[in-house]
Amino acid sequence: MTSPNINASKLRLGVNIDHVATIRNARGGDYPDPLRAAKMAADAGADGITAHLREDRRHITDTDILRLCDEIDLPLNLEMAATEEMLAIALRHKPHAACLVPEKREERTTEGGLDVVGAFDKLKPYIARLSDAGTRVSLFIEPDPTALDAAKALGAPVVELHTGAYCDFGPGAQRDAEFERIVTAAAHAEQLGLECHAGHGLTYDTVKPIAAISTIKELNIGHFLVGEAIFVGFDATIREMRRLMDEARQGVRA
Ligand code: PXP
């Protein structure tokens, strides 16, 4: 029997299926289907499905969001820019969660955290309107105390710490320093009463130290899972990621 302590520290895995849609859209048509991937992720141990509806619809489409809302049992985390168009879509579908992310047309992926300090006044009504609709809002931010304080002041219950820099630095001093920033930020989030998530760029090689931070409650992972699935299958890839996360959680770092 697992101890209540370990259960309490269970780390959730949100599987981001954007890049199943990227492959589909490379040829047009319906294949491969992100909904099928979401169902497979659920069977493989995912705790939630994450999908980013970008302004340019480069991967996930409006129809994908509709089908995910209608047909999956897991909670949906809708990643979205703070725009009136996306807000209207979120208010129509009322996903379990919405993660506000910065979005630039020319970027290949979400390249940095939200400017929660500079965009404070702009973000506040989005957080309020989503929260009023019953959607749990998270803010995708850099692991930085000032950003965390602003997130708290904005009234968001959850923050997602950007792990992209930690992953992009190879092993060595820079990665270690970025990791310590994440540890400190996760502790600061807990002190503020914010639920702390993390994600971006995580792989089998980089996930374990992050998963061992006990104050982090959820990881959102996509690109690596879809890429590795080419070699060993989506189910096996998610199961292995889940196993590594659970293993790291046994020796949690406070
Ligand atoms: N979290 C957020 C807020 C993201 O924008 C992304 C990328 O869409 C991820 C997590 C997942 O990143 P990756 O696809 O690199 O695993």
Image: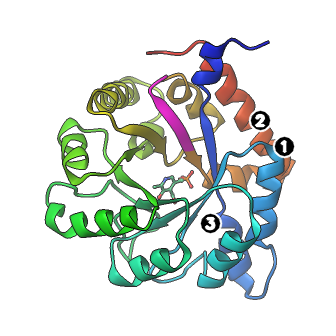
Please tell me which of labels 1 and 3 falls first in the chain.
3
Is 123 displayed left or right of 169 in the figure? left
Q: Amino acid at mark 1?
A: Ala
CB within 8 Å, label 1 to label 3 = no
Ligand 1 closer than 8 Å to label 3 CB: yes
Residue 110 vertical placement versus 82 (above, below): above
Q: Quadrant of residue 93?
A: bottom right
Residue 215 vertical placement versus 74 (above, below): above
- Residue in the foreground of this view, choosing between 4 and 29: 4
Q: Which mark is residue 240?
A: 2
- For image coordinates 31% across by 29% down, the residue present is 181
Residue receiving disc 3: 18
Is 15 displayed left or right of 117 in the figure? right
Q: Which mark is residue 236?
A: 1
CB within 8 Å, label 2 to label 1 = yes
- Residue in the foreground of this view, choosing between 150 and 251: 150
Q: Quadrant of residue 13?
A: top right
For the residues marked 1 and 3, what is the alpha-carbon distance in whole angstroms? 18 Å
For the residues marked 2 and 1, what is the alpha-carbon distance in whole angstroms? 6 Å
Would you say residue 157 is visible in this rendering? yes
Magenta region, residue range: 214-219
